[in-house]
Image (cartoon, helix red, strand yellow):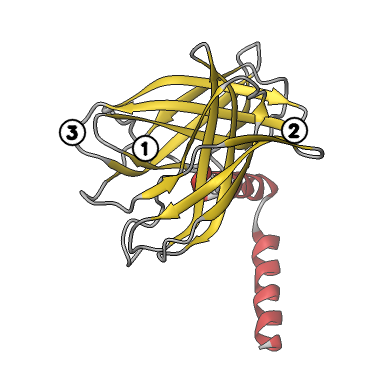
Amino acid sequence: MKRAAITLIAAGLLLAGCESTQDQSARLEEEGADLVKATKVDIGAENRFVDVMDKVVLTDQYGTAVAVVMKNKGQEGLSDAPIAINVKNSKGRSVYRNNSAGNEFSLLHVPVVKPQSDVFWVHDQVIPVGGVPASVDVTVGEAKPLPADIPEIVVSPPKLNRDPVSGLEVTGTVTNQSEVEQSDLVLYAIGRKNGRIVAAGRGMIPKLKTDGTPATYHIFFIGNPTGAEISVIAPPVNLSGGS
């Protein structure tokens, strides 16, 4: 194996020696462009049935988050709908996009969008580069159809607490009332005042079993939820036993 590797390296050096500087530069540029394309996520065509009803960028000492409220006008539900966000500074320049292939799946997709219904989604790991976030563009792409019957996940009313280190959080319980176990179940929380989103956050339950045992959730906010009307949802991520 070592000898084969040495032979391959030598052959590569010989090829490189026959290649002009201009050709080598063009080749490397092309390879670099291909690499950039390979590490970016393209959500495809915009979903004509989904309207973005509200979108906001929130920043505090704990970071930056984007919260989006969307409505599915269609008669069919959607699952794992791809979502693209482009966070901009006050001059309209992009300071963050969530289109990196290395992003967590839930930061690139909305798990469940029921027909004729509203749903909200939160990205709480925005790392802006090049300015203070001021606005966000949002696009929802085409998605897989949602099965007629999906697991029912029940979330208890949230209780607001203050953690001395991490700030304000909501806690409660989540219960799986289906026969489909949930793995890495993401919870989304938003706080509204006078109809405006003033706080948002996410939490996760690593495993939610089907025995009806409640699991405790903790969701920390970006923004100030004090005095706000807080909503928490936990859309199922595993829709069937085979997922």
- Can you tell which mark lies on residue 120? none
Sequence-earlier tag: 1 or 2: 1
Calculate the distance from the C-alpha at mark 1 to the C-alpha at mark 2: 32 Å
Give the image quarter of residue 134.
top right
Q: Nearer the viewer, residue 241 or 162?
A: 162
Q: Are marks 1 and 2 in contact (CB under 8 Å)?
A: no
- Identify the mark at residue 44; answer none if there is no mark: 1
Which is nearer the N-term, disc 2 or disc 3? 2
Q: Establish if 180 lies above or below 1.
A: above
Residue 102 seen in the current view = no
Q: Amino acid at mark 3?
A: Gln
Quadrant where the C terminus is found in the figure: bottom left
Which residue is at the front of the view, 238 or 134? Answer: 238
Q: Nearer the viewer, residue 218 or 12?
A: 218
Q: Quadrant of the N terminus?
A: bottom right
- Provide the residue designation for mark 3: 75
Report x, y in % for residue 109.
Answer: 44, 42
Where disc 3 sits, the SS reads loop
Q: Is residue 175 left or right of residue 12?
A: left
The correct choice, above or below, for 111 with respect to 135 in the image is: below
Look at the numbered disc 2 and give the secondary structure of its residue: loop
Say which residue appears at 70% left-offset and 67% top-offset.
Answer: 13
Q: Which residue is mark 2?
A: 62
